[in-house]
Amino acid sequence: MGERVLAICEGEAGAIDHRALAAAALAQRCGAESADVLVVGAAPAPPGRWSHALRLDPVEGAALTEPLAALVACGYSLITLGDTPLLREVAGRLAARLNLPLVASVQGLRRREGQIVASRPAVGGARTANFAITGQPALLVVHPDAADASPTASPPAPAFETLEGGTSIPAFRLLEETRLSPMEMDVTEADVVVAGGRGVGGREGFELLGELAQLLGGSVGASRVAVDAGWVPYARQVGLTGKSVSPRLYVACGISGAIHHTLGMRDSSFIVAINTDARAPIFKIANVSIVGDVREVLPALIANLKSRSSPAERVAALAGATQ
Amino acid sequence: MNIVVLLRVVADPGLAAGVSGSTVRLDDPSLVAIGQALVLRKLLPGVRLQGIAAGPSDWDPALKEALALTLDSVRRIWSGSLATGDIVATAHALATSLPPDPSLIVAGSAATDHGSATLPAALAEILGWPLLAEVASFETRDEGLAALVRGGGGSRRIYTVPERAVLVAARARAPSIYPKVRALLAARKSAIPETQPATTRLEPTGRISLLDYGPPRPSTRHLLKPSAAANPADRIRMLMSGGMAARRGETLDSSSNTGASLAKQLADILLKEGFVR
């Protein structure tokens, strides 16, 4: 398109939010002359060939609007934003403040007769609505499934330039913050899921899984076999007849990997599988395969992780485990 | 105290055989917003709940259902220039059509704006109000009204809610709230007033225009697509694994490692990949 685009992504704890990766991928593939990336939070630049990499500290959406409004005025024709709650707020506020065209849930982008055409689902997903965008710059909130965001070989991102943040005047005072324990946290909202199947052996085995999930800051999932056996409630079932999850890390313990289960967890970014059967199908989709008994590997792994954590973290983990 | 609830109506052909004879209904995020507004009415006595929607007259049967769910009033704004779904234009139209002296605006996760979930933020910016997203529930504390916000990775935060704010409900299943038959019959007899937005900032045609509708985008997430280059046995394996491309990585075998050694190697990998801090 011979234009400049800006991708705005959000990340924390050293990784880009997976919902924002498609915004970066779409910015890379829209045919613009140059693409810049802005990362809100402490995360590396997403994969891609970026001309400039910018960073902004995360604050509430209203405070982000000020510095972003100045950035948007720097000659970009398109600005893609990740589909996260913070970036959706930023998109809405920017569009209203600068009177910019905004299309959300964008699933595709192309050029038709000199116009940028963005498509998004309509009529409850039964149709695709195609919009011609004439105003520039245009804001596009990109649906997480819009573009294949799988990592590709890309040159190292340029050094980050840090932008001055806006004045943060929180309108909402934080009174209390808690983190749910692994057995309280829903599997669909967890970044890490430690799931068990028949090989876990029983309820006691799931207590071990809970301990590992606590150490990794995740939730406990299960295959249908474990749920049918009454070891864990149905709400924890992952698979075709349970919930679909897409965590950053999925640890499959004693799960064979039948298609009914893998359909619910195949979008996991990194899969670790532990199973005694070296021919278990789960190993074909795992990044790390451990041929061994869950009841031997897990206690050793938990002890190892505990020995690595700081005393303060150990106290916090123990406190969480006893709640 | 006036609380405004943003409402959105969706077509549901499955309703055609129903008693109402209508094929539209309130979408689930709107029902979640109504559920939260009803909670607020219980927590804050004297609250008046007012629903507002930006849509055509076809929406009226569903909006009457909102009335039957005990909202004090429901209004609809409409202008032909809103048909493209321009979010900024819709936000301006809503901002100028709000009831007098609104305190809180409650929206569903995708209310009123074709599922984009960006309209409440645009509305907040126009009004100069703060916005709190992912609100799961409310409670009253010594500090006043507080909102429980659902964060990523199982975090839960409780914030005070100021006098004026836009509150966006977290995604959730529609609550089990049903109108009483008497309220439903009364609502069906009432009319949903339509007003023209009192704003001149409704010129979306210069920026966004709806070209056409196409077939739905195929959801590749649900397609099983084995590699054409693979041999038949591998293709069957790919199909059996749910269409996932094989990403066989490192294998650690207990035959040559003790449990502690396996655990150490795995812990090292988790540390290297950034899963252990």
Image (tube, grey):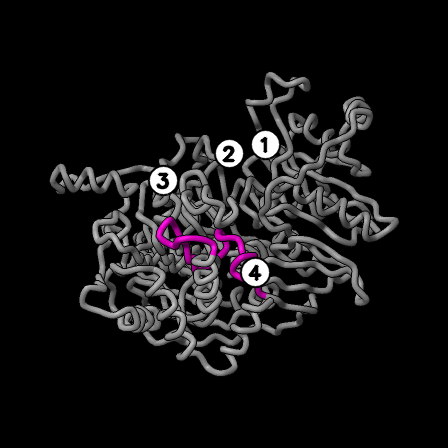
- Residues A44 and B36: in front is B36
Q: Amino acid at mark 2?
A: Gly
The label nearer to you, 1 versus 3, is 3
Q: Secondary structure at mark 3?
A: helix
Q: Secondary structure at mark 2?
A: helix
Q: Count the numbered circles shown.
A: 4
Say if mark 1 contacts mark 2, CB within 8 Å: yes
The label nearer to you, 4 versus 2, is 4
Checking the image for residue A260, the label placed there is 3
The label nearer to you, 4 versus 1, is 4
Q: Which residue does the numbered mark 4 point to in the structure image?
A: B151
Say if mark 3 contacts mark 4, CB within 8 Å: no
Residue A274, given in percent of the width and then of the height, sits at: 31, 58
Label 2, residues with CA under 10 Å away: few <14, some 14-19, many ≥20: some
Q: Which residue does the numbered mark 1 point to in the structure image?
A: B10
Alpha-carbon span between mark 1 and mark 3: 32 Å
Label 4, residues with CA under 10 Å away: few <14, some 14-19, many ≥20: some
Magenta-drawn stretch contains A293:
no
Q: Which residue does the numbered mark 2 point to in the structure image?
A: A124
